[in-house]
Image: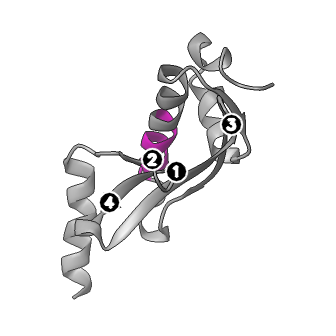
């Protein structure tokens, strides 16, 4: 059985990663391994036009593959597109923004 799940992990690397935005639950989701596993980024509205990007979680088996990066990008693009301000509580998003320093991101982040 383990061999089969290995194949699914490899498929993730070869197929384009699709990020879903679940606005009701306030989360960005990447379905992994069919959809048994999920990587998520959680956020909360803390004001009318202010979000707190709180937490990013990738299952252990999928770490180190750049999956969280897709979640962070989707979240930051959402913040910019909706013209929101963001608190970056999640350490990973802080790191992502440092490594991808785009002026349009900085305009939307509470420093």
Q: How much space separates mark 1 and mark 4, taking CA atoms?
A: 16 Å
Q: Where does residue 85 sit, x and y in percent of width and height?
A: 67, 26
First in residue order: circle 2 vs circle 3:
2
Residue 67 part of the magenta segment: yes
Please say if the residues under marks 2 and 3 sit with CB atoms less than 8 Å apart. Answer: no
Q: Name the side, left or right, on which 63 lies relative to 16.
A: right
What's drawn in magenta, residue-wise?
A: 65-73
Mark earlier in primary sequence (4, 2): 2
Check residue 94 in the rendering and tell me which mark sits there, or answer none: 3
Looking at the rendered image, the disc whose residue lies closer to the viewer, 3 or 4, is 4
- Residue occupying image coordinates x 48% and y 54%: 64
Q: Say whether marks 3 and 4 touch (CB < 8 Å).
A: no
Q: Relative to residue 28, is residue 18 drawn left or right?
A: left
Q: Is residue 14 left or right of residue 96?
A: left
Main SS of residues in magenta: helix
Q: Position of residue 107 (x, y in %)?
A: 67, 14
Task: Say which quarter of the image contains residue 108.
Answer: top right
Task: Point out residue 102 in the picture as x, y percentages from the top left corner.
Answer: 57, 15
Q: CA distance from mark 1 to mark 2?
A: 5 Å
Read off the residue under disc 2. 23
Callout in the foreground (4, 2)? 2
Give the labeled residue for mark 1.
26
Do the numbered discs 1 and 2 sit on residues whose CB atoms are within 8 Å?
yes
SS state under label 2: loop
Quarter of the image that includes the C terminus = top right
Question: Mark 2: few, some, or many residues within 10 Å (few <14, many ≥20)?
Answer: few
Q: Secondary structure at mark 3?
A: helix
Residue depicted at 47% across the width and 21% down the height: 81
Q: Which residue is mark 4?
A: 31
Packing grade of label 4 (10 A; few <14, some 14-19, many >=20) is some
Q: Is residue 12 left or right of residue 81?
A: left
- Is-magenta flag for residue 45? no
């Amino acid at each position: 059985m383990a061999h089969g799940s290995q194949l699914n992990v490899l498929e993730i690397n070869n197929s384009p990663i699709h990020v879903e935005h679940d606005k009701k639950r306030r989360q960005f989701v990447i379905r992994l391994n069919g959809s048994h596993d999920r990587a998520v980024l959680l956020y909360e509205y803390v004001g009318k036009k202010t979000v707190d990007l709180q937490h990013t979680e990738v299952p252990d088996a999928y770490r180190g593959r750049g999956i969280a990066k897709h979640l962070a990008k989707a979240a930051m693009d959402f913040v910019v597109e909706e013209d929101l301000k963001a608190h970056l509580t999640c350490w990973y998003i802080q790191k992502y923004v440092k490594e991808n320093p785009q002026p349009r991101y900085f305009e939307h982040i509470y420093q």
